[in-house]
Every structure is written in structure tokens, then in C-alpha cells.
Amino acid sequence: MSLMSPALRPYFSTAGLRHGARAAVPAFPGFIMFALAFGAAAAQKGLSLGETLGLSAFVYAGASQMVGLEIWQKVWTPSTILTIMTVTAIVNARMILLGATLQPWLRDEPIARTALNLFLITEAGWLVSTRYHNEGGRDVGVLLGCGIILWMVWIAATLGGFFAGALVPEPRRFGLDLVMPIFFGVMLVPLWKGTRAALPWLVAGVVALIVHALVPGYVFIIAGALAGVAAGMLIE
Amino acid sequence: MNTATIIASPWGSVLAIAAMAFVTYLCRIAGVVLMSRVRITPRIERGLRALPGSIILATILPVVIDNGWPAVAALVAAVIAMAVTRIDIVGLLAGLGTLAVIRALG
């Protein structure tokens, strides 16, 4: 045990950055697909290139970017900004779990580097880095290298998707106006862990439909998502 | 017209992106900050695990139903294609293709 502990102390190396970038390659296809779909959907929705890239670069969280498009406005008021902020917070609340599991690894890191590492955290990057950590790796450079390369892939693919989406004539003919819900439906399949685990989803969907029928605006997303969380907490 | 509450473009979009980026970053750092103070109980963890699928259904069900049966058919086709092949581009193209065919015929 005492011989093992020095090797298991977290450290940082630039060689780790390269290692992390290589380890992230299996996550590229999923990232590229999602960012292409987002870029195309944003162009369809009428967002400018700057708005689309701004969302990808600074928010950098695919699901909330997609949901954000649903709520996007041509003209903003304080209340629509508050709505999109609340919806984004709820959609991204699951990231709290990712950060919590990384805490022991980052405990002794300089704050600035941890701030950057956490900005770059995504589910895919977390999976890659956690696998490395579980195999005994402690180089924080791997986490950062993985985060940086995935962020760059995300931006590049957003750009590609935006131009693809903006250039298609008559997008409705190709179903592109519904690329967001169809892509989300596809993303649901790998999340499937049996009917029991999916019960909260059903609750979320039903509550969203009811609220959508009764209340104008986008409260239905918040109500549905919160109902799903509540159901998840109640179902053992 | 209540112009006082309207935020002039392009500042509305800038503010919206900044607000989204801010709360997303809070979510990213919250786990690390909270871990030293609060314990994430199994119950809270179960709730958060149900979140991704719940968000997806809560977002797409009303949108798809508003767009009528062709959208429902496209969604079903996309999910089936994805479940069979496990390749997300195949699922997406099956959905868009189904919608395109239905619209071309109708």
C-alpha cells in the first residue's frame, strides 16, 4: 500500500495532454454528429453564425444548446432570458454528478487549471478520463488534453453543420425543420436501461404534454424534466 | 407596445448566450464545490440519472405531436433504426428520410 500511494498521487504533465487527446478519439463520431445536427438546426432556426458558434464555444453542452434552440427568440426580454437560463440550468444539472466524481482527482490542482478543466467537462470526456483514472492513471493532463481536443472538434463540426443547414434549399422537403426532435429521439436509444429505468421518462413526457396544452411558452420542458427527476427519486 | 422590456439586438442574443454559459458553468463546478460540503445521496443520484431521458421526452413529445402524424412516424422510424443498428447517423437519416417521403407523397 505505502509503495503504491506515491504513484497514485495526482500530477500534471504535457505528455498527458497528448495522451488525453489520443484517448478522446473514440468520442469523435458522436461529437461530430451532435454538433453537425446542432449547427444545421441552428441555421434552420435562423440563428446567425456568431450566435451559433457562441453557443457552441461558451455554453458547450449539446443537449442544452438543442433545447435552447427550441426557446430561441428573435427579440429578447428579461423574462425570455430568465426562461432560457432556467431551462439550461435544469438540462445541465446532471453535470453536477460528473464534477462530484472528479473532485478527488482535482483536489490539489491549481484553481485556474481546475476552472479550465471543469469548463471543458462533457459526458464523453468524463467517460474517457474516468476510464483512465479507474485504470490507475492520475495525470490531470490527460483530462485536460481530452477536454481541449473535444472542444475543438465540437466547434469545427458546429461550423460544418451550420453551413450545411444554411445551404440546403427548401429544408422542409428534407425534414430538416424537425432535425432537433428526431436527433433527440435517436439519442434516447443508448440511454435505454430497461422499462423500469424509463418510467421517469414516461412521467416527464406525460407531464410535459399536459403542461404544454395548458400553459403557453416553454414551461412544459421545465415541468416535464422536474417531474422526471421526482419520479426517479421516488422509484427505487 | 411595451418597448421598455425589450432588449435591443444584438445584445439580447449576447445576454442569452452569456446567461446559458453562466448557469452551465455553475453546473460544471457545482459537483466539485459541493462534494466537500454536501453528500450526494443515492436518492439525489437516482433523480439526476433520470434527468437526460426525461429532458428528451419532455422536449420532443409536445413538438412532435404539434407537427402531426408524419412527425410521429419519423420519430418512430428514427428510434427503430437506431435500436437495430446502434449507429446514430442511420437513425437520424431514417427519421429525416421518412419525413421527407411522407411530405413528398402528401
Image (cartoon, rainbow, N blue to C red):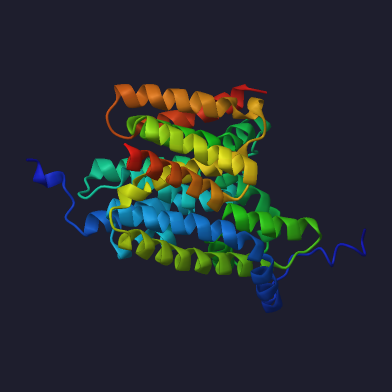
- Residue A86 in the image: x percent, y percent? 38, 41
Q: Relative to the observer, which residue lies in front, A124 or A195?
A: A195
Residue A182 image position (x, y, % from top left): 45, 42
Q: Tell whether B47 sits left or right of A161.
A: right
Instruction: Left or right? Give the position of B33 relative to A69.
Output: right
- Residue found 51% across the figure and 69% down from its top: A152
Most extreme residue toward the left, as rendered?
B1
Identify the residue shown where x is 54% and y is 36%.
B53
How many numbered circles does the render carry? 0
Q: Is residue A127 left or right of residue A174?
A: right
Which residue appears farthest toward the bottom when viewing the image?
A14
Extreme residue in the front direction: B105
Residue A36, x across and y down, in percent: 45, 59
| Residue A80 lies in quadrant | top left
On screen, A63 above or below A140?
A: above
Q: Position of residue B35 (x, y in %)?
A: 63, 46
Viewer-proximal residue among A118 and A57 = A57
Q: Is residue A205 above or below residue A67?
A: above
- The quarter of the rendered structure image containing the N terminus of chain A is bottom right
Residue B55 in view:
no
Work out whether A36 lies above or below A76. below
Residue A42 occupies quadrant: bottom left
Q: Depth check: A61 or A180 in front?
A: A180
Of the 4 image quadrants, the one containing the C terminus of chain A is top right
Residue A58 in sight here: yes
Q: Residue at x 43, y 32 (%)?
A: B72
